[in-house]
Image (spheres, rainbow, N blue to C red):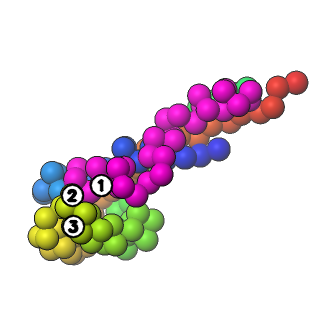
Amino acid sequence: MAEPDWEGLLIDSPQPAMSRALVRFLVAEIIRNATIGRSLARVCGEAGLVVRSVATAAPVFRDFTTADHVFGLRRNVTRAVDAGYLTPDAEGWIDDLSSQPFLASALLFLVVAEIPG
């Protein structure tokens, strides 16, 4: 199994407060269980599975278009502005990120578990 931990989403920006506010919005309002990645091994154990291994990976996105497709950056910036998590100037912020060197990453938990017996 593999699940991200959305609190571990990182977006490099000259305005780190803007990135943090976007992540706060995603975790609070968009992602149903934002910490499922870190909880996956425990949940498997509670379900009676034997957890054989836990590993992490942190894919790095250097292409804004790909990151936007995966994370819905533009769409979620608009939603975050509407919800009051970001100010209206966030629209310009995301445009700036799309036109300069870009880097984002998210922590992914990989769990191997099996039914006992």
The reply to whether dot 3 and dot 2 touch (C-beta < 8 Å) is: yes
Classed neighbour count for the residue bearing mark 2: other residues with Cα under 10 Å, few (<14), some (14–19), many (≥20) = some
Disc 3 crowd, CA 10 A, few/some/many (<14, 14-19, 20+): some
The residue beneath circle 1 is 25
Whether residue 100 sits left or right of residue 47 in the image: it is left
Q: Residue sitting at 58 percent across and 36 percent down?
A: 40
Q: Identify the mark nearer the N-term, 1 or 2.
A: 1
Q: Residue at x 61, y 32 (%)?
A: 43
Q: Which residues are magenta?
A: 20-49
Q: Is residue 48 above or below residue 96?
A: above
Residue behind mark 2: 85
Note whether residue 9 is visible. no
Q: Earlier in the sequence, mark 1 or mark 3?
A: 1
Q: Is residue 59 positioned above or below 101 on the image? A: above
Give the residue displayed 40% in from the left and 58% down from the top: 30
Q: Tell me which residue sits at (25%, 63%) in the image.
A: 83
Q: The residue under label 1 is which amino acid type?
A: Phe
Q: Foreground residue, 91 or 62? A: 91
Tell me the SS state at disc 2: loop
**Image location (x, y in percent) of residue 94:** 22, 70
| Coordinates of residue 7 in the picture (x, y in percent) | 36, 44
Label 1 and label 2: CA atoms lie apart by: 6 Å
Cα gap from disc 1 to disc 3, whole angstroms: 10 Å
Q: Amino acid at mark 2?
A: Tyr
Direction from residue 75 to residue 55 in the image, left or right: right
- List the residue tagged with mark 3: 81
